[in-house]
Image: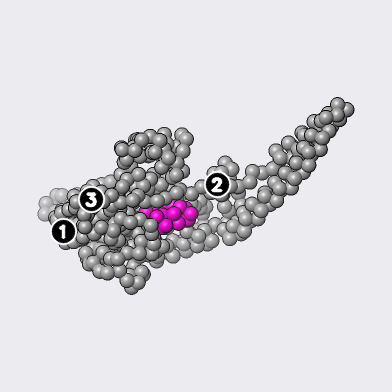
Amino acid sequence: MSQLARDRILSARGLDGVARKMRQAQDDMASEDPAVRAKGMRRYDRLEAEFIAGGGYAAESEAAVITSNLDLPERVLAQPLSTLSGGQRRRVELARILFSNADTMLLDEPTNHLDADSILWLRDFLKNFSGGLMVISHDVELMELVVNRVFYLDANRCVIDQYNMGWKNYLTQREQDEHRRKRERANAQKKANALMEQANKMRAKATKAVAAQQMIKRAEKLLRGLEDERQSDKVAAIRFPDPAPCGKTPLSAQGLSKSYGSLEIFTDVDLAIDRGSRVVVLGLNGAGKTTLLRMLAGSTEPDTGEVVYGHGAKLGYFAQEHEILDGDRTVFENMKSAAPDLDDTRVRTILGSFLFSGDDVDKPAGVLSGGEKTRLSLATLVASSANVLLLDEPTNNLDPASREEILNALKAYQGAIVMVSHDEGAVEALDPERVLLLPDAVEDLWSKDYQDLISLA
């Protein structure tokens, strides 16, 4: 994590080591010692020749186009990865993949953490990419632009259906396939019932017992030859907890600031979260939104200022990077740790409502997919009686049906919420009273005038 963001991107073509040594040689060239300066010049000439031979300057220019369109400015590229926000690190990794010149790219939710302009650029980039793509995404417009083949993983039927067609045609064809399966099953069931009914009548006569048995076998064969009918996808049942009683202002902060080295993230943030209030935090990527929530949750110390927990305050924190989950512990153990007062039966019931059942509860949290980690993190909130929820991008990595559940849960929750989100639907469901703009620490009453800032967050 000490690697610079720029070097991480250049490493996709093996240029990071040479670029780093060139910077060191440049530092030596500025030395007051003539011998060090001369040695630095000789090293720089040799390294530059190696860099050019590897397509270095042209590659740097290509990387600059990618990083510019993914909203990774020079100040971010010059920082160590450890100082970047989760969204910035994901964009650095995306830039690295796009820069790699790979024949085939595997992209898992590539539009997450991108603003509206970056999403438009990425769609166009992938549309014109000449290599192969395997994409998992809930961005329908991206799918419509780039997909010419769909693998549909039907978890209910435990099969992968392959469709050699574009996204819109796939949706139409899949619907037709479902109707065909239902129709075939209904017809086969009707014929099988008729055969079984006739066989039962013939069984009574010894002379027709053999014929009856053959009819039964024909009926069974009819049903065996059918494709399984697809069941409705299971959806996590999400309902945030009834908030525990608390004082008028369960959470407040005064004079919070944070810097990483010489890079100032934000300064002098004041915030008062009253019982049942709703606040949305907006700002460009890297403005410190996640850092602020971590401070309010007590997992990151501010450089200045303090966070004050009021009478009866009970916080529930949904972390964007799921760092509150212990990757070495199982799903069940993480849940028990979050809700030690619940008995095992109640814990399993809650996990079941979030689609963790059977052996799933014994999986280490570290092997879960992004969507599964999101569901487990939400389950820990449901098990609490938190009266203040700190939500950092709670709809990321969720399928449309689960996202809808989250939005309904936000509307129904009676406690206080502080939320960071670039999902306009989530902010609409939150129906915030106030907005906090970072990094300027400006607080204002919410109005529709701030709506356009959400997708830029």
Q: Identify the secondary structure beneath mark 1.
A: strand
Q: Is residue 398 magenta?
A: yes
Which numbered tag is attached to residue 313?
3
Question: Does 452 appear in magenta?
Answer: no
Quarter of the figure with residue 453: bottom left
Mark 3 or mark 1, which is nearer the start of the sequence? 1
What type is the residue that disc 2 sits on?
Leu
The amino acid sitting under disc 1 is Gln
Q: Residue at x 66, y 44 (%)?
A: 227
Q: Distance of mark 1 from mark 3, alpha carbons? A: 17 Å
Q: Nearer the viewer, residue 20 or 55?
A: 20
In front: 134, or 20?
134
Residue at image position (67%, 49%) is 181
- Within 10 Å of disc 1 (Cα), the crowding (few <14, some 14-19, many 20+) is some
Crowding around mark 2 (Cα neighbors within 10 Å: few <14, some 14 to 19, many 20+) is: few
Q: Quadrant of the C terminus?
A: bottom left
**Residue 49, percent across and down?**
32, 53
What secondary structure is marked by label 3? loop
Q: Which mark is residue 153?
A: 2
